[in-house]
């Protein structure tokens, strides 16, 4: 009986010591000074969310598997595959740009995008590499887009989703073409860099997305200046 009592006392003492240590640690962390920094020499993490004090998401740094699907007006898009990198979010709860990258034996790339408010990208610094005709080719440079403010991304998505729900692919493609002709899908206006064809220079398009001015050096090191009409035909240089 005495041995049993001593054993219970030892168990109770151990429990009390452990509980005291836990309480001390809780008190230390509870009264830790706000703004005090924690230093890590190295850390492995799959995703980091940067938030405001309110909890609003501002930036995600993530691997491919846990990458954020994107967000518009504070609502997340359905889950989708995205590359590892950094995604930015504005104060209105929209994705507003990012830096993503990847690469393997078949293809590689890195893209830094800046989005127009409530719309898709208007500026993009892009590097793209792929296999073409049994050889490795690449294109890289600066792209600029023009997007109308009367057709924000949310409105465009609503129109396309409504048409797609009709299960009429011909009609769906017709609507896309009509929107593209009106510039409502966004128009690529400018590229400065290297094309997959090996041309390096400036390539400027009109409001319809048609090439109008080319100032470049071709793959044979021949300098060229081309002015084109709306049909792509050469216009004499004045």
Image (spheres, rainbow, N blue to C red):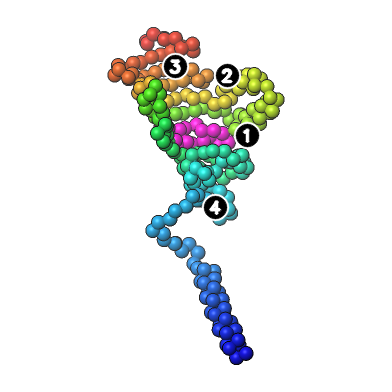
Identify the residue position indicated by label 3 in the image: 212
Residue 169 lies in magenta, yes or no?
no
Question: Is disc 2 in contact with disc 3, using a CB cutoff of under 8 Å?
Answer: no
Left or right, 131 with respect to 116, comes to: left
Return the x and y of residue 60 as percentages of the image width and height. 51, 46
Question: Is disc 4 in contact with disc 3, using a CB cutoff of under 8 Å?
Answer: no
Label located before the other in sequence (1 or 3):
1
Q: Nearer the viewer, mark 1 or mark 3?
A: 1
Disc sitting over residue 181 in the figure: 2
Return the x and y of residue 134 as percentages of the image width and height. 38, 24
Whether 193 is drawn above or below 102: the answer is: above
Residue at 44% over, 35% down: 111
Identify the residue position indicated by label 1 in the image: 154
**Can residue 92 be seen?**
no
Disc 1 residue crowd, few under 14, some 14–19, many 20+, Cα 10 Å: few
Residue at 43% over, 21% down: 204
Q: Secondary structure at mark 3?
A: strand
Identify the residue position indicated by label 4 in the image: 52
Return the x and y of residue 197 as percentages of the image width and height. 38, 21
Question: Is disc 1 in contact with disc 3, using a CB cutoff of under 8 Å?
Answer: no
Q: Secondary structure at mark 1?
A: helix
């Amino acid at each position: 009986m005495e041995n049993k009592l001593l054993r219970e006392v030892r168990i109770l003492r151990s429990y009390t010591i452990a509980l005291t240590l836990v309480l001390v640690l809780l008190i230390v962390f509870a009264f830790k000074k706000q703004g005090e920094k924690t230093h890590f020499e190295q850390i492995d993490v799959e995703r980091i969310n940067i938030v405001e004090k309110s909890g609003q998401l501002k930036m995600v740094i993530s691997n491919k598997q846990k990458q954020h699907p994107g967000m518009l007006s504070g609502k997340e898009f359905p889950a989708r595959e995205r590359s590892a990198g950094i995604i930015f979010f504005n104060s209105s709860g929209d994705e507003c740009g990012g830096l993503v990258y990847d690469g393997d034996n078949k293809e590689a790339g890195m893209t830094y995008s800046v989005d127009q408010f409530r719309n898709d990208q208007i500026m993009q610094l892009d590097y793209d590499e792929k296999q073409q005709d049994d050889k490795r080719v690449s294109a890289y440079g600066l792209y600029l887009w023009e997007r109308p403010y009367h057709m924000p991304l949310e409105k465009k998505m609503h129109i396309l989703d409504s048409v797609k729900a009709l299960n009429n692919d011909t009609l769906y493609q017709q609507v896309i073409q009509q929107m593209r002709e009106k510039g409502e899908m966004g128009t690529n206006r400018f590229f400065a860099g290297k094309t997959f064809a090996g041309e390096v220079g400036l390539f400027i398009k009109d409001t319809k997305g048609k090439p109008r001015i080319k100032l470049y050096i071709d793959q044979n090191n021949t300098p060229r200046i081309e002015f084109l009409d709306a049909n792509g035909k050469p216009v004499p240089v004045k």
